[in-house]
Amino acid sequence: MKILFTSTILLFCLSAIFMISAEKKGKKFVSELTLHDFMEDYTKPATKLYEKQNNAEYLNKILDKVPAMAPADQQAEWKEIIDAKVAIGKPEDSCKSCHTKFKKEYKKNYRKKLIAVPEEFKNFPEEIRTLLKKK
């Protein structure tokens, strides 16, 4: 009886360890991030893909949604900046333009504010990494 009880406890502990380690290995989609983290995890790799392989697909999809992540009173200006840069074929410059105009105020007032990451971006980081490895 003691052996059965001990083996059951041991099996339970091993199963728990296996489940915890498997959970840590798989990256979960985070539906809310700070704007800084979003830019690091999504926009930066998409810009790198554009610069290295002239593939603007991901960058343009991201830039299309970025104005909605701005504070309500700045959304129109963010959209104007992005649209102007995309229209002249320089989507990567839209980030620099917004940083120049809004960075200090955003850091001061909204640094810790969480923004919603669109569900359609769920696989973007992995897809972009895969494309960057191909060349």
Image (cartoon, grey):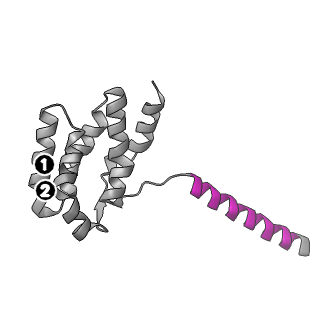
Residue 88 appears in view: yes
Q: Nearer the viewer, residue 12 or 22?
A: 22
Where disc 1 sits, the SS reads: helix
Report how far apart the C-alphas of labels 2 and 1 lie in the structure.
6 Å
Of the 4 image quadrants, the one containing the N terminus is bottom right
For disc 2, the neighbor class at 10 Å (few under 14, some 14 to 19, many from 20) is some
Q: Would you name the residue on which mark 2 appears? A: 75
Residue 58 rendering spot, x and y as whole percentages: 31, 38
Among the 4 quarters of the image, the one containing residue 8: bottom right
Of the 4 image quadrants, the one containing the C terminus is top left
Q: Is residue 20 magenta?
A: yes
Residue 91 rendering spot, x and y as whole percentages: 21, 37
Where disc 2 sits, the SS reads: helix
Among the 4 quarters of the image, the one containing residue 111: bottom left
Q: Is residue 81 magenta?
A: no
Q: Residue at x 30, y 58 (%)?
A: 35
Q: Check whether the beta carbons of the residues at disc 2 and disc 1 lie within 8 A of each other.
A: yes
For disc 1, the neighbor class at 10 Å (few under 14, some 14 to 19, many from 20) is many
Find the magenta span and give its range. Answer: 4-25
Disc sitting over residue 79 in the figure? 1
